[in-house]
Structure formats: structure tokens, C-alpha cells
Image: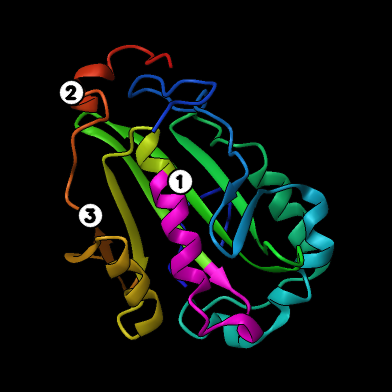
């Protein structure tokens, strides 16, 4: 699992809302329900902690992150931070989803994106996690792909993730999203990123970022 840059964790067509200037992105669009062939991505709620806590209790999930399982109360507090949707200074937009099986509704993991506006464009840092019993079925790639598509539709020009150099499964997901490893290393993890793209309106976000971009 790549490490989220933040997302509130201390460890096609536009939608309602707007991505505002370089000084803040807190007014961006809320996380919508997203669907793929087998999965449903449901925007995070604090109440999800009860059903997610057992999935996140497996120490095997944290082999490459150095983290450890959290208690139900700790998970609730984490989700309370995440559902605020933005950092206190307004420079990051936090978007979090629970990943469910479309057919049964059972939760299998989570994905998140941290949006940051820079002078040269809008960037999204991604992280994904699939519970151990549901791994090796392509769910991480499928969930991250539908998330990446939506982020591109919102104007994200760069997608990135910080990945442990031995985490082959996450590197596979990153490659599927068009990311390649960079020379940047953050807390022992290699930063992967896509090449910058033009915005969907044909101009760079840097040119638009001087004012709020309305849908």
C-alpha cells in the first residue's frame, strides 16, 4: 500500500464545486460515489469505522509501511479528521472512499487522494489498501483506476504515490495508472508520478489557478 501524503491521516464533466487558487483547494468538489465493473467506492463516513476495523486489524497490511493496526476508537478519530475534507490551512483537499464489492456490498479496502494546487498545476497523491483476504484479485488496480479517471476529470494534471521499494504489488498498480518512479525518496519510499497533462479545458492549471475555476 502506498503511503498517503495526508488525506487527514496522521500516520468527462465537472461536478458541483470548484478547485480554487493556489492558496487553497478546500472548496473543491466532494467525493462522489464511484463505480467500476466489480467495485463501488463509497465516500467515507465516521460510521464506517465499525466495519473497517476488523479488516484493518491484520498486521500483514503494514509490512511495508511501518504502521500497526489501530483500535476502533483510534480509527473513529482518524475518520473524524479525514471527513473534514481539507487541511487546517486549506492547502490540501482530502478525499477518502471505502471500497466495496458491487455485488454484495462487503467492504474490501479503501482508497484516498490528497489534492494540492501548485503554481504549475493541480496534483493528486493517491493511496490504496485492500484487506489481506481480498488481495491478488486485481481490486487495488480496479479501484485506483476508477479513482484516477475521476481525478483527471476534475483537472488533476499529475497523479503520484509514495511506494516502498520492495512493494511489488503497489508498483504494479502505479504502472497501471501510468506512473513511473522518480528520483525523489520520502521517508524511505520512492515517489512515483505520471507525466503532467494539460487540463481538460486545454490550458494548464497554472494559468487558471489565479482564480477559482467554476464548473
- Residue under the point 38% across and 14% down: 212
Tell me: residue 71, above or below residue 87: below
Secondary element type, mark 3: loop
Whole-angstrom CA distance, mark 1 to mark 3, is 15 Å
**Residue at image coords 67%, 45%:** 81
Q: Are marks 1 and 3 in contact (CB under 8 Å)?
A: no
What residue lies at 49% left-to-right and 30% top-to-bottom?
A: 89
Residue 82 showing in the rendered view: yes
The answer to which of 12 and 28 lies nearer the viewer is 12
**121 on left or right of 107:** left
Is residue 167 visible in the rendered image? The answer is: no
* Secondary structure type for disc 1: strand
Q: Which residue is mark 2?
A: 203
Q: Horizontal and vertical percent for residue 198? A: 18, 34
Q: Is residue 46 above or below residue 38?
A: above
* Quarter where residue 83 is shown: top right
| Viewport quadrant of the C terminus | top left
Reading the image, the residue beneath label 3 is: 194
Instruction: Decide if residue 77 is on the left or right side of residue 85.
Output: right
Q: Are marks 1 and 2 in contact (CB under 8 Å)?
A: no
Q: Which residue is mark 1?
A: 114
Image vertical order of residue 180 relative to residue 87, above or below: below
Between residues 209 and 102, which one lies in front from this camera angle? 102
Nearest the eye: 77 or 133: 133
Q: Does 32 lie within the magenta span?
A: no
Label located before the other in sequence (2 or 3): 3
Magenta-colored segment: predominant secondary structure = helix
Amino acid at each position: 500500500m502506498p503511503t498517503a501524503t495526508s488525506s487527514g491521516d496522521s500516520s468527462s464533466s465537472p461536478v458541483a464545486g470548484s478547485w480554487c487558487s493556489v492558496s487553497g483547494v478546500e472548496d473543491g468538489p466532494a467525493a462522489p460515489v464511484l463505480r467500476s465493473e466489480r467495485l463501488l467506492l463509497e465516500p467515507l463516513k465516521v460510521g464506517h469505522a465499525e466495519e473497517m476495523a476488523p479488516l484493518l486489524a491484520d498486521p500483514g497490511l503494514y509490512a511495508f509501511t511501518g504502521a500497526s493496526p489501530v483500535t476502533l476508537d483510534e480509527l473513529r478519530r482518524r475518520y473524524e479528521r479525514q471527513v473534514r475534507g481539507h487541511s487546517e490551512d486549506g492547502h490540501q483537499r482530502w478525499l477518502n472512499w471505502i471500497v466495496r464489492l458491487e455485488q454484495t456490498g462487503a467492504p474490501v479496502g479503501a482508497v484516498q487522494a490528497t489534492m494540492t494546487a501548485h503554481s504549475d498545476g493541480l496534483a493528486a497523491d493517491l493511496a490504496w489498501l485492500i484487506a489481506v483476504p481480498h488481495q491478488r484479485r486485481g481490486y487495488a488496480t480496479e479501484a485506483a483506476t476508477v479513482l484516477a479517471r475521476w481525478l483527471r476529470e476534475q483537472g488533476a494534471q499529475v497523479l503520484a504515490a509514495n511506494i516502498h521499494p520492495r512493494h511489488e504489488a503497489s508498483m504494479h498498480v502505479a504502472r497501471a495508472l501510468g506512473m513511473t518512479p522518480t528520483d525523489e525518496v520520502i521517508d524511505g519510499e520512492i515517489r512515483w508520478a505520471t507525466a503532467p497533462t494539460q487540463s481538460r479545458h486545454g490550458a494548464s492549471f497554472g494559468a487558471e489557478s489565479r482564480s477559482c475555476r467554476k464548473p
